Image: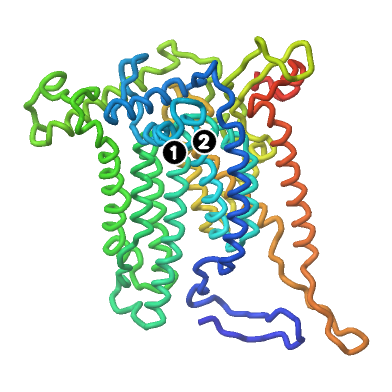
Amino acid sequence: MTQVTSRATVPGAVPTWSSPAPLRPSPDFGPLDSLRGWLVTAVLTAFAAVTRFTMLNYPTDAGTPVFDEKHYAPQAWQMLTGGGVEDNPGYGLVVHPPVGKQMIAVGEFLFGYNGWGWRFTAALAGTVLVLLVVRIARRLARSTLIGAIAGILTIADGLLFVSSRIGMLDIFMALFVTAAFGCLVVDRDEMRARMALVDVEGRIGATPWGPRLGVRWWRFGAGVLLGLACGTKWSGIYFIAAFGIMSVCFDVAARRAYGVPKPWHGTALRDVGPALYSLVLIPVGVYLATYWAWFVSETGVYRYAVGNQVGSGGPWSFLPDALRSLWFYSGESLHFHEGLTNSAGNHHPWESKPWTWPMGLRPMLYYYADTNVTGCEQAQCVKAVMLIGTPAIWWVAFPVLAWMLWRSVVRRDWRYAAVLTGYGAALLPWFLTLDRQMYYFYAVPLAPFLMIGLALALGDMMGPARPVPIPRSPSGTFLPAIPSERHSLGLLAVCLYLGLVVANFIWLWPILTALPISPGNWHDHLWLPSWR
């Protein structure tokens, strides 16, 4: 244990400790202010719900879906009316797995085929996402204040706000991968708590590989959520790879911290196998289960490809025909995506490439109307919904990323390394396929990790709120300790910055929600040439 060499004797002063290095980590397995943490979470989640659900059914295209809702809302409705399967007459093929459309179908079941129906679960997912970001940032920082900051950033981000109010798939993807990340962070804390208990009992060195850590339900839950992410979009596979490596690194670090003689061998022997089960096999099983309606259908696209499009023999004939048909179906979907390339002549006026996403330099126009629009008190009015990240948040992305890298590499701060893992899994794989069409809404899954990383950086800006000892007063009494001036100034700076973020979000509100504005006001909102 850490040895105590000196302690301040002045009442009200902070004890001072010194030691060459602690032999074991401090017993810190999560924040302790449970009641206050849940109260703050509830308030911010309620506020997020108000922003996400207000006027949710507006706008529509004469009562029909807007933008890519035109694909997913009808397909979800087909799931309700066609035995759980869908087709896509516009393309002759369904190009995404079913989970996101199943989520949309839940709203349509509750409210019917209207704006509320095909957007309800997206708004619910966007609200729950705020809750998750608050709880994850709070756990990483061990601070309810930092969790609240992350929640405010998430509420006031235009990208997540608009994505929560449209019937598309990306907000569900962001929800599932963020929830999986949170599960693995909780799993890390729980495994360290188990290691600490084994250490107290004197059993760390019982074998050179350290103890077995038992059933890990949080990691199992992460596997289920990653399976749902893959069942929403195939890009979920990037998170399986990244989070799997991250979880194993957590295990190696825990075994090293508690003095396991052979931590790498112990991780390979004790942890890698269960990690593969939880974070590979379970997602595969969940992904296949999301196609349950397709498996039991008679008319699903390519349901009976074996014997028709695919021969019944061959080296893979030992597999069930249903799985082989699904493999063919998936191959056709992949072929469709591979054909959407710039070199093949496919261009879109609002296309963007991944190097523009960190700062949101190329947003996307989801809806625009300038005919028969009234309500702006001008002769001509327009209304628009633009998918755009709040500049006060996204334009500081590169300094924040640099800080996160420095903290991860130089200071070996696991929190920043974990957040960078999620951010990188959402961004870096897209650089491998730059020729294909890409859009800013692909960046939705990286947004929660930006919010969490920015909140952690703002926490570092504030610094610790250590009380400063006050010398004895002339009367002989002791004065109460006060917070450090650095923390007070840092808190002031953070509050001013959050005020700027909220003001920027309010300024963008008309072009996030299709409020009628004048053409001049519309152009005033388009700050950069790339926004036009």
Displayed quadrant of residue 524: top right
Q: Quadrant of residue 391?
A: top right
Labels 2 and 1 touching (C-beta < 8 A): yes
**x, y percent for residue 150:** 61, 50
Distance, label 2 to label 1, CA atoms, is: 8 Å
- Relative to 334, say whether 148 is above or below: below
For disc 2, the neighbor class at 10 Å (few under 14, some 14 to 19, many from 20) is many
Near-viewer residue (451 or 71)? 71
35 horizontally vs 380: left or right: left
Q: Residue at x 42, y 73 (%)?
A: 258
Task: Write the residue at 51% across / 58% down.
Answer: 414
Furthest toward the right, the residue is: 474
Query: What colour scheme does the image use?
Result: rainbow
18 to the left or right of 477:
left
Q: Residue 437's spot in the image, x, y percent?
A: 46, 21
Q: Is residue 299 visible?
A: yes
Q: Position of residue 407 (x, y in %)?
A: 58, 55
Q: What residue sits right under mark 2 in the picture?
A: 444
Name the one closer to the observer, 435 or 68: 68
User: Of helix, strand and loop, which one carries label 1?
Assistant: helix
Read off the residue under disc 1: 173
Seen in the picture, residue 189 relative to 285 is either above or below; the reply is below
Q: Position of residue 152 (x, y in %)?
A: 65, 47
